[in-house]
Image (cartoon, rainbow, N blue to C red):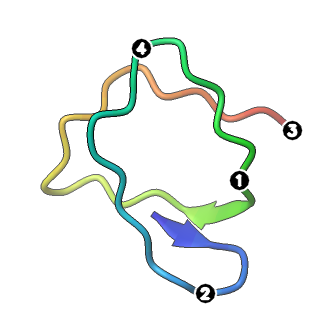
């Protein structure tokens, strides 16, 4: 993902149901196993 600041990040081993308080500008779809990701506004 790309943060609102422009920094690129990748997370590993995030538990199901986790809430990550992040400001994201883009989620990259390739090379991930992320399913059912929700964004709150």
Judging by the rendered image, the residue that carries numbered circle 2 is 6
- Res 15 → quadrant: top left
First of labels 3, 1 by sequence position:
1
Judging by the rendered image, the residue that carries numbered circle 1 is 22
Judging by the rendered image, the residue that carries numbered circle 3 is 41
Badge 2 local density, few (<14 within 10 Å), some, or many (20+)? Answer: few
Residue with the most extreme right position: 41
- Residue drawn 56% across and 22% down? 18
Residue with the most extreme bottom position: 6
Q: How far is mark 3 from mark 1, CA to CA?
A: 11 Å
Is the Cβ of the residue at disc 4 closer than 8 Å to that at disc 3? no
Q: How far is mark 2 from mark 3, CA to CA?
A: 19 Å
Judging by the rendered image, the residue that carries numbered circle 4 is 16
Please say if 32 is above or below 35: below
Give the SS element for disc 3. Answer: loop
First of labels 2, 3 by sequence position:
2
- Residue drawn 65% across and 27% down? 19
Badge 4 local density, few (<14 within 10 Å), some, or many (20+)? Answer: few
Q: Nearer the viewer, mark 1 or mark 2?
A: 1
Quadrant including the N terminus: bottom left
First of labels 4, 2 by sequence position:
2
The number of numbered discs placed on residues in the rendered structure image is 4
Whole-percent x, y for residue 35 in the image: 32, 24
């Amino acid at each position: 993902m790309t943060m609102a600041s422009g920094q690129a990040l990748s997370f590993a081993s995030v538990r199901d149901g986790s809430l990550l308080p992040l400001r994201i500008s883009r989620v990259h779809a390739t090379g991930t196993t992320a399913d059912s990701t929700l964004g709150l506004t």
